[in-house]
Amino acid sequence: SLQVNKLTIVEAYNVLEADGIISARQGAGYFVNSINRFSAKLKSTFAPVQNVIIPEQGRSSFFDMYTATVEAQTQPGMVNFGCGFPHPPKDIDLIARRALRQAPDGLFKYDLPQGQLTLRRQIAQMLIQQGMEVTAENLIVTSGSEQGLSLALQYYLQPGDWAIVETPTYFGALASLENLGAKIIGIPMTAQGMNLDLLEKYLKSHRPKLIYTISALHNPTGITTTQAHRQALLALAEKYECPILEDNAYEGLTFEPAPAPIKAFDKQDLVIYLGTFSKTLMPGLRVGYMVVTGKHFHKILERKLLHDLHTSTISQAIVSEYLASGHLRRHLNRLRTENLHTRDVMLAALERYFPQEAKWTVPKGGLFLWVQLPEHTPIQTIRIEALSQNVLVPCHSVFFPDRKGYPAMRLTFTPSPEEIEQGVSVLGKLLKRYLYA
Ligand code: PMP
């Protein structure tokens, strides 16, 4: 008979529990968690590839990917699965005109680096509702959260320092880390958030200077880190005195209330929090914000001044007027309803057209989901063929610290239901042709 070491079985139970497939109940044993039709297909732990990466300098994949996606926006007939922002609010032009008409004198002058007080107060109110203790004095309005990202990375990291990211992760963060000459440790995502056992292992062995996490509706997987995982992550950061950069770019787009941000539990000024209006209003406004507490605030503010003096006063006034109008709640409700519908259209299309071996996440909001494909999928060939049929899929490798990763697709569900159906069917046919040839 087959001999299996008991430790192997214990380890298997641990893995299943960490992946959310089973739960332990004290005194009663292990139980299989309920899974819906879609999440049954989700591969709960992303392949633990590439834990320690020393990137080469000077790669331009961020530039290529960004410019290709922006250019594709204007191409007629293209099903763009790469685009990372939602439809803008219908009434934004009215609000913008009103903001300019009512413009106080200061609107056209130089401003303070931290941004306009009214806007900072409004943002503080939004964050308080999410459970964060914050005032206008802890807030810096940034030129998109991209600027907050680079300010925080520059503040914490010197060339040669180790930084921890989730694998896969936002390619803009990887590009900024590479640009700084940081060395990257990629910790695989699980269905609950980054793998905490591996995180602790690398916190101990490499003493990284920063953990970068996208806590809600993670880019690119769409996974929201659970409440328990957030607290455990913060506890580890405290134990090893490692700062966290919490990027919450997609937070406003949740279908159901998300757990409170990690920053809400931060008592030691270890967490810098990033938010943005790019995903809820318009990316072209370039208005984001960062919450920085304690001694770090002034040091980061001085850097902000060096970057661009301050964020555009006109953009700030438009956002502020939009928040004052009370239209944001209605706009977000509309976006959520639309996105929930198109997400479900995409899930149904994936079931229908994609091969059995493909697994995908079922995000509780945001703009995209992540499809994991078999190792031998010729993904680049498929992308190129799809593009010749007017279907754009972003290059999966830009999301991995080693720029290789495993075959995967990040698919945005903001195109129309018809476009999604058409685009997914093109991709599905190509995948089946190449996988079953
Ligand atoms: N963080 C994440 C996770 C993102 O996906 C993006 C943009 N796609 C940004 C930050 C930057 O966004 P922005 O500068 O427009 O706020």
Image: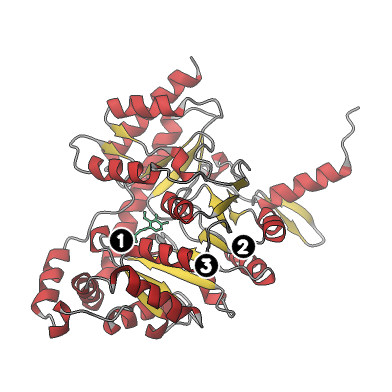
- For residue 404, say whether it is visible: yes
The quarter of the picture where residue 197 lies is bottom right
The quarter of the picture where residue 304 lies is bottom left
Mark 3 residue CB less than 8 A from any atom of ligand 1: no
- The answer to whether the residues at label 1 and label 3 have Cβ atoms under 8 Å apart is no
Identify which amino acid the numbered label 3 is placed on. Answer: Tyr
Q: CA distance from mark 2 to mark 3?
A: 24 Å
> Is 435 above or below relative to 56?
above
Camera-near label (2 vs 1) is 1
Q: Secondary structure at mark 3?
A: helix
Mark 1 residue CB less than 8 A from any atom of ligand 1: yes
Q: CA distance from mark 2 to mark 1?
A: 27 Å
| Disc ID at residue 302 | none
User: Which one is nearer the viewer's eye here, 320 or 416?
Assistant: 320
Which residue is rendered at x = 65% and y = 57% of the image?
A: 199
User: Which x, y percent locates residue 225?
Assistant: 55, 59
- Residue assigned mark 2: 229
User: Which x, y percent locates residue 380?
Assistant: 42, 28
User: Which one is nearer the viewer's eye here, 224 or 350?
Assistant: 224
Q: How is the image coloured?
A: secondary structure
Q: Secondary structure at mark 1?
A: loop
| Disc nearer the start of the sequence (2/1) | 2
